[in-house]
Amino acid sequence: MKIFLPILALFTFALSDLIQAQDVSQLTAQCAANAGDVMYLKDFVVKLDQGTPGGAPPTARFALLLSKNVVYRFSICSAPSSDGEAVLQLFDMNTLLGSTFISATGKDFPFFDFKCQKTGVYHVFISFKEGKAGEGVGIMSYVKKL
Amino acid sequence: MLNKINPWIMPKVIVYLLIILAVAAGSCKSGGQGKDAGSEIPDSVLNEGIEISEDVMQDIVQNISSPVEMAAMIKDLGVPYSNRYISPTDRVGNLTTSYQQALNLGIYAADLGYLNMYNKTSAVIDYLTSIKTLSDAIKVGQFFDFTTLKRLATNSKNLDSLMYISVHSFNEMDKYLHSNNRTNLSALMVTGVWIEGLYLGTQVYKVTPSQQLAERIGEQKLTLDQLMLILENYKKDKQYAKLLDELQLLKELFKSVNIRIEKGEPEMIEENGMLTIVQHDKSIVEISPEQLSSIIATTEQVRNRLISL
């Protein structure tokens, strides 16, 4: 019995890891499908802890190379179990180009399209509203050539 | 609760659990560090001589080259399909080192993207098989759902799913290599994707020239810089040094390609509940026909040397 319990704990741990990986995979596939009639290029899986009170919300950052004359779609989905609601922002250096959440109007968008006119390195930032803990996935898709 | 378990079943359960754990441990080991039998890349390449941190490396590598973007652009330009642009699969058996396998995995992934884009399902199976063989060889085959992909490839109506699973599998392999300190193999895969994408673009340009394609070729200068920055970290290995020499030939040609930026403010448009961001910064690629000719010729030479390794 003594040997059984640690083995069971290990087995349960391995199983929960596997289930979590499957959940992420399903969320990614679902989020890519929700992006509409576009072609999936990349996903950004994010799991963040809650931020500290008064501090900046924890943020995941991803560098991307985008090409001129292409319309890209950036989508965001929060995991069903996520505390916080995920927000995706696109930056060119320090300039915010687009966001799935417009703080001025309080409006959320499941995705936005970006008509890229300059080839170069951009950054996707993903965080959760009010610095809450959360899990989510961002998707970058190819829409069309301009 | 455990006391209610039949005492005759308990030993069997323990044996089954031990077997499961042993198998899981074995599979984790085989999917871990790059000490596979077929590997000819010494461990020194993995960690020594790294001039920039793994985190920074990962930041650079993200999306450096997609296996479908060049093909998507070519299709959008209305260029017809040609099997002359893709690498033959009959040489997979000759690829015995992890260096060759990772590089060619990238090359075939780009070819698969091109085939999928044009819905060439009959040829897709060959490329799926090659990718499966190579991904198993470098121990990332677990991310490549060959059975599902093969099933999807038999029906042209499944193109979206086929495309999604192909690209997603490639991304998962890349992520796994990163998280297991095998960035050297990821760099090779990405190089393979990039060189095959450039080869495709330049070959198409020879037959169907267009300003947009010329610009796309010229702006590969930026990608090449990023790629070489990564590969520089492994140049102690002579295979990587040789690859860098090949890419240096292209870099010399791209040096004279000028990319200038016109500044502008981004514009946000909300229409029918959809949000669109229009960028008004603009990159302008200045590339002459002579520069293009040299890049096309050298790309062909470099790519053909790489696939004949």
Image (cartoon, grey):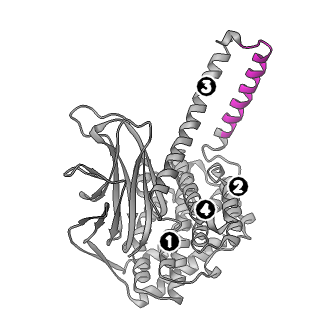
Instruction: Name the residue that disc number 1 marks.
Output: B247
Badge nearest the viewer, 3 or 2: 2
Q: Are callouts 3 and 2 both on one chain?
A: no
Decide which of tag 1 and tag 2 comes sooner along the chain.
Answer: 2
Residue at mark 3 to residue at mark 2: CA–CA distance? 30 Å
Report the disc number at residue A10.
3
Labels in figure, total: 4
Residue at mark 4 to residue at mark 3: CA–CA distance? 35 Å
Q: Amino acid at mark 2?
A: Thr
Badge nearest the viewer, 4 or 3: 4
Classed neighbour count for the residue bearing mark 4: other residues with Cα under 10 Å, few (<14), some (14–19), many (≥20): many
Q: Residue at x 39, y 65 (%)?
A: A72
Give the magenta range: B5-27
Residue B234, placed above or below residue B304: above
Residue B138 within the segment the image draws in magenta = no
Report the disc number at residue B147.
2
Chain of the residue displaying label 1: B
Q: Secondary structure at mark 3?
A: helix
Q: Are callouts 1 and 2 both on one chain?
A: yes
Q: Amino acid at mark 3?
A: Leu
Classed neighbour count for the residue bearing mark 1: other residues with Cα under 10 Å, few (<14), some (14–19), many (≥20): many
Residue at mark 4 to residue at mark 2: CA–CA distance? 11 Å
Between A68 and B218, the one nearer to me in the picture: A68
Percent from the top left, x then y, of residue B241? 54, 64
What is the residue that sits farthest to the front in this orientation?
B272
Residue B14 within the segment the image draws in magenta = yes
Quarter of the image with the N terminus of chain A in it: top right
